[in-house]
Image: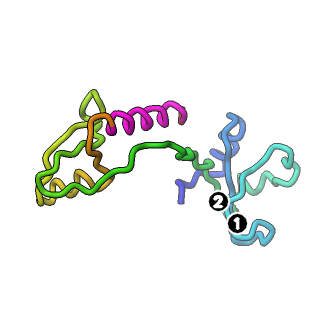
Amino acid sequence: MSELISGVDALRALADGKEVQYWSENDPSIQMRWTTMTGHFWDQYNLGYFLNEKTAFKFRLKPRTVKLEIEVPAPFQPKVGDIYFIVHPAFKSGYTCNTFDDTEKHKEFVKYGAWRTVEDIKIVVEQLRKLKEHSK
């Protein structure tokens, strides 16, 4: 669950143009789910929902999501002795390479994917950077 905010903070966020969601176990009309507040239904919200300390309503900022629709080369599972490339933020290039051995360290390195060639990892890094740009 996303971090809860107070009713007052929810009102501030709405005034700032942010998307706010509410939840109430006591309101069967919303069927115990997060509901996004929309401007064309302002008359349905009672100020007490936001300001009453004992309100049954909980508030949060609507979680932001990014739909992942990227095409990248398929990763592979390296075997002992294979050279592999992985995404690595500590390098300016965004990736690094290594030779796989059967240690826990290398198993951890490849758990999010490993690629066989520098060309493949460059495509992966490029797509991830584009994804970051789209989420701004």
Give the colour scheme shown: rainbow
| Residue at 58%, 49% in the rendered image | 63
Above or below, comparing residue 35 to residue 129 in the picture: below
Q: In the shown orientation, is residue 6 left or right of residue 125?
A: right
| Residue at 16%, 43% in the rendered image | 98
Q: What residue range appears in magenta?
A: 120-134
Q: Earlier in the sequence, mark 2 or mark 1?
A: 1
Above or below, comparing residue 39 to residue 106 in the picture: above
Kind of residue sitting beneath label 2? Lys
Q: In the shown orientation, is residue 110 left or right of residue 38?
A: left
Q: Based on the picture, tell me whether residue 132 belongs to the magenta stretch.
A: yes
x and y percentages locating residue 43 in the rendered image: 88, 50
Q: In the shown orientation, is residue 53 left or right of residue 39?
A: left
Q: Which residue is mark 2?
A: 58
Badge 1, how many Cα within 10 Å: few under 14, some, many 20+? some
Above or below, comparing residue 83 to residue 111 in the picture: above
Q: Main secondary structure of the magenta part?
A: helix
x and y percentages locating residue 118 in the rendered image: 27, 35
Kind of residue sitting beneath label 1? Ser
Check whether the beta carbons of the residues at disc 2 and disc 1 lie within 8 A of each other: yes
Is 62 in front, or is 89? 89
Q: Quadrant of residue 12?
A: top right
x and y percentages locating residue 129 in the rendered image: 43, 33
| Residue at 73%, 72% in the rendered image | 26
Tell me the element at label 2.
Answer: strand
Question: Mark on residue 24?
Answer: 1
